[in-house]
Amino acid sequence: MTQVAPGAGRKIGDVSAESVKPVSRQERKQRTRQALLDAALAQLADRPFAVLSLREVTKQADIVPTAFYRHFTSMDELGLVLLGESMDVLHRMLDAARDTGTDFDRVVHTVVRTLYEYTRAHEAHIRFLTRERHGGGGAVPQAARTELRMFAGDLAVDLARFDCLRRWRTDDLRMLADMIVTTLLSTAMELIETVPRTAESDERILATAENRLKLIARGAAHWT
C-alpha cells in the first residue's frame, strides 16, 4: 500500500481543524460584549441613551435578550461603559496636545488639529458624549456631566503652566477650562453634523475654532 505523506493532496487554501486556533470562552464573551457596545453606539446616532431599549441593542448585536445580562447588569451599566470609552478619547486628545509648549497660537493650532483627527476617528463616541452632556437626570447624563467637569479640572491644571495664568485663582482657571471644553465639543459636533462634508467646510470650521480659542486666550491674558 502506498503511504501518503501528511498534508499531501491538500489544496492551497484548505484549512484543517489543526490549523484553526480555537476561540476561548473568554474571547467569545469579550467579542459579544463588544458587539453589544457597538450595537448600542450605532443605535445612538440620532437619539439619546434614555430612549434606547435592551431589545434594540440585542437585536442589532444578534443575541437573545437574556444573554445581555451575562455582560451588563443593566442598560445604565452599558451606557457608563460607553461613557468611559468616550472620555478616553478626550483624554488621549488632551495628552496628545500637552507636548506643544506654552505658546498660545501654537497650542491652539495643535489642539484644534488634534480635535479634528480624534473627531473623525471617533465620531460616534463624540456624538454620544455631547448629547448625553445635555441629557436629563438619568445615571448616564449625570455621569457625563461629572466626567466633563473632571476633564475641565485636568485642563485647568494644564492652563496654570502658562505664565499669564500662574497667579489665577483655581475658580477662574476652571471657568476658563469650561469655556475651552465647550468650544471644543461644539466644534466637534459642527464637524460631524455639517452637510455636505467637504475639505473646504472642514477647514472653515477649524479656522473658526482656532479664532474662537485665540479670542478666549487673548481675553484671558488681560483678565484681572
Image (cartoon, helix red, strand yellow):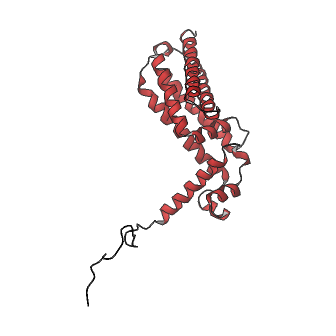
Q: Is residue 173 visible?
A: no
Residue 178 placement: quadrant: top right
Which quadrant would residue 68 be assigned to in this image? bottom right
Q: Quadrant of residue 148?
A: top right
**Quadrant (top left, top right, bottom left, bottom right) of the C terminus:** top right
Instruction: Name the one closer to the observer, 203 or 102.
Output: 203
Quadrant showing the N terminus: bottom left
The residue drawn where x is 55% and y is 44% is: 85
Position in image of residue 9 (x %, y %): 33, 76
Q: How many numbered discs sit on the rendered protein?
A: 0
The image shows residue 29 at horizontal and vertical percentages of 53, 61
Q: Position of residue 179 (x, y in %)?
A: 61, 23
| Residue at 63% in and 48% down | 42
Q: State the residue at coordinates (37%, 72%).
A: 18
Q: Residue at x 62, y 27 (%)?
A: 182
Give the camera-side residue of 202 and 196.
Answer: 196
**Is residue 10 in sight in this rendering?**
yes
Query: Which of 46 and 40 lies nearest the eye of the viewer?
Result: 46
Task: Give 217 or 143, whichever is nearer the viewer.
Answer: 217
Residue positioned most to the bottom: 1
Left or right of 91 on screen, residue 73:
right
- Measured along the vertical axis of the image, is residue 90 above or below residue 100? below
Residue 221 sits above or below residue 109 on the image: above
Could you tell me residue 108's position as x and y percent? Answer: 50, 21
Q: Is residue 142 above or below residue 166?
A: below
